[in-house]
Image: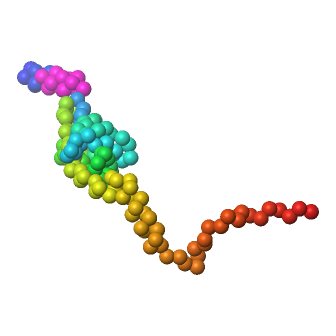
Amino acid sequence: MRHNRANHAKFSVLLALVLAMGGCVQRQLTVTTNPPGALVHLNGQEFGRTPVTRDFTWYGTYDVTLRRDGYETKKTTGKVIAPWWQWVPFDLFAELLPLTDRRTLHYTLQPSTDEAADPQRMLDRAEALRGQLQSTSNTRQPTTAPLMAPPASE
């Protein structure tokens, strides 16, 4: 009986220590790009400039937008899948332990084309496309007449 009490006391002390550690899973997401320095938006909210690491709460698929001067804007998705120990019912026990889940999303940016970067080329292209427009019976020519006639005076 004494042996049983001693084991029970040891287990109680061990359980109290584990609970006192205040364990919870810390989740960190790092976004990197090649080249670095891109502005990152996750689900429409600014996340920072790459390389950037922040805590996150939810696993799943994120909408990712990356912007950097001189490079094409990249709109894509990033999947952050939960590890097995974050699945029900294992997550109940994992939350008691001081664990850290580190995830990384990496993207490569493509240099922008000269046409998009040069405003004069863009204007020249717009002028060329304007000449290719075709008029239909629904297309009106601009007029200088007022849209509504003034009211007739009595």
Residue at horizontal 53 percent and vertical 76 percent from the top = 135
Q: Is 100 left or right of 44, judged from the image as shown?
A: left
Residue 16 lies in the magenta-colored region? yes
Q: Is 65 left or right of 153, judged from the image as shown?
A: left
Q: Is residue 134 above or below residue 61?
A: below
Instruction: Tell me where residue 36 sits by quadrant.
Output: top left
Residue 8 point in image, percent of width and height? 14, 25
Residue 48 point in image, percent of width and height? 31, 38
Count how many numbered circles sit on residues in the image: 0
Residue at horizontal 46 percent and vertical 71 percent from the top = 131
Residue 41 point in image, percent of width and height? 34, 45
Q: Is residue 101 above or below residue 15?
A: below
Instruction: Tell me where residue 99 sits by quadrant.
Output: top left
Of residues 86 and 27, which is closer to you in this image? 27
Residue 154 point in image, percent of width and height? 92, 63
User: Can the viewer see residue 29 in this picture?
Assistant: no
User: Can the viewer see residue 113 in this picture?
Assistant: yes
Residue 107 lies in the magenta-colored region? no
Q: Residue furthest bottom?
A: 137
Q: Residue furthest right?
A: 154
Q: Is residue 33 above or below residue 97?
A: below
Question: What colouring style does the render use?
Answer: rainbow
Quarter of the image with the N terminus is: top left
Residue at horizontal 15 percent and vertical 24 percent from the top = 14
Of residues 68 and 86, which is closer to you in this image? 68
Residue at horizontal 19 percent and vertical 39 percent from the top = 102
Of residues 23 and 151, which is closer to you in this image? 151
Of residues 153 and 18, which is closer to you in this image? 153
Predominant SS of the magenta segment: helix
Q: Which residues are magenta?
A: 10-22
